[in-house]
Image: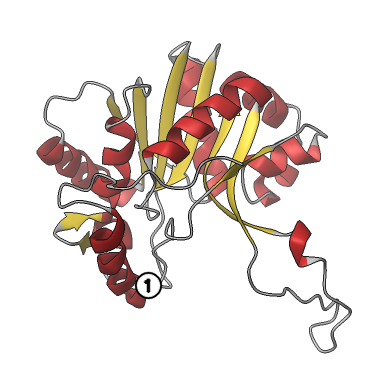
Amino acid sequence: MINAAAILSAGKGTRFGSDLPKQFLEIDGMPVLIRSAKAFLDCGEISLCIVASGADFKEYTESLLQKYFPNDTRLRVITGGETRSETLLKILEYLRENELLDGCALLTHDAVRPFITQRIIKDNIEACRKYGACNTCVKAVDTVLHSSDGVFLDGAPKRSELFNAQTPQSFDAKTLYELISNTPKEKFLSMTDGASVFIEAGKPVYIVRGEDFNIKITYKDDLKRGEQIVREHFGKAGTQSGTGRKND
């Protein structure tokens, strides 16, 4: 039985407006990707860390990881796909080819969500082992409105029942692979993430409580916010200084 982290780093970050993908930009002197990888490598329960890189930046990713983690044998770099779904499938294929699917708890995480905490990682492992799938979420704060035509509002879902998704999303790797294998390819590729595969199959996905500061770096202003998050919640080495929210 292994706990494997899979960091999705194949995105090009076109909305960000930078020649260098945002996962390689620095927050407080440390690249975003390195902050994400370090969080998982700092967890003693993680036995494998797969970084799925874009083809154009695979060598760059390998050299960057080697610079920061020169002696960590748990790291692997693979080439991701053009979409999130394709990258997820490539990660699962890697596990299958290396006979690691059985008994594997797979924690999938956005490379550009660098403020993941040890509490969230451990809660994901525990929930994945117990329920087979889980998604890190925070309760929705803003009212969400629905419009079927994009012109007029139809109504507002109950805010108390709404959550904003974060990552990690974690799964029993073998079950996820089997579900994807039994899903028509076109349908799978239209799904947004692994949790959707479980939900579509009628299988439960447990909610792991996230943190408001577990943000995704999407726009340039997020880098400035990230600097503040580091000061408030993390030490200079990138290690979380507080205990964070407990699962409830």
Q: Residue at x 73, y 59 (%)?
A: 162
Q: How many marks?
A: 1
Horizontal side of residue 164 vs 96, given as left or right: right
State the image coordinates of residue 131 (x, y, percent, origin top left).
67, 25
Residue 21 shows up from this direction: no
Q: Residue furthest right?
A: 154
Quarter residue 233 falls in: bottom left
Helix, strand or loop at mark 1: loop
Q: Residue at x 38, y 55 (%)?
A: 112
Quarter residue 197 falls in: top right
108 is higher (above) or lower (below) than 151: above
51 is higher (above) or lower (below) than 160: above
State the image coordinates of residue 207 (x, y, percent, origin top left).
65, 42
214 is higher (above) or lower (below) than 59: below
Horizontal side of residue 33 vs 158, given as left or right: left
203 is higher (above) or lower (below) than 7: above
State the image coordinates of residue 125 (x, y, percent, origin top left).
51, 27
Q: Residue at x 82, y 66 (%)?
A: 158
Horizontal side of residue 141 vs 156, given as left or right: left
Q: How is the image coloured?
A: secondary structure
Of residues 36 and 24, the one nearer the viewer is: 36
Crowd class of label 1 (few under 14; some 14 to 19; many from 20; radius 10 Å): some
The residue labelled by disc 1 is 16
Q: Residue at x 81, y 75 (%)?
A: 146
Instruction: Say what amino acid the circle numbered 1 marks.
Output: Phe
Of residues 42 and 187, the one nearer the viewer is: 42
Residue 246 shows up from this direction: yes
Q: Name the quarter where the C terminus is drawn.
A: top right
State the image coordinates of residue 188 (x, y, percent, origin top left).
70, 42
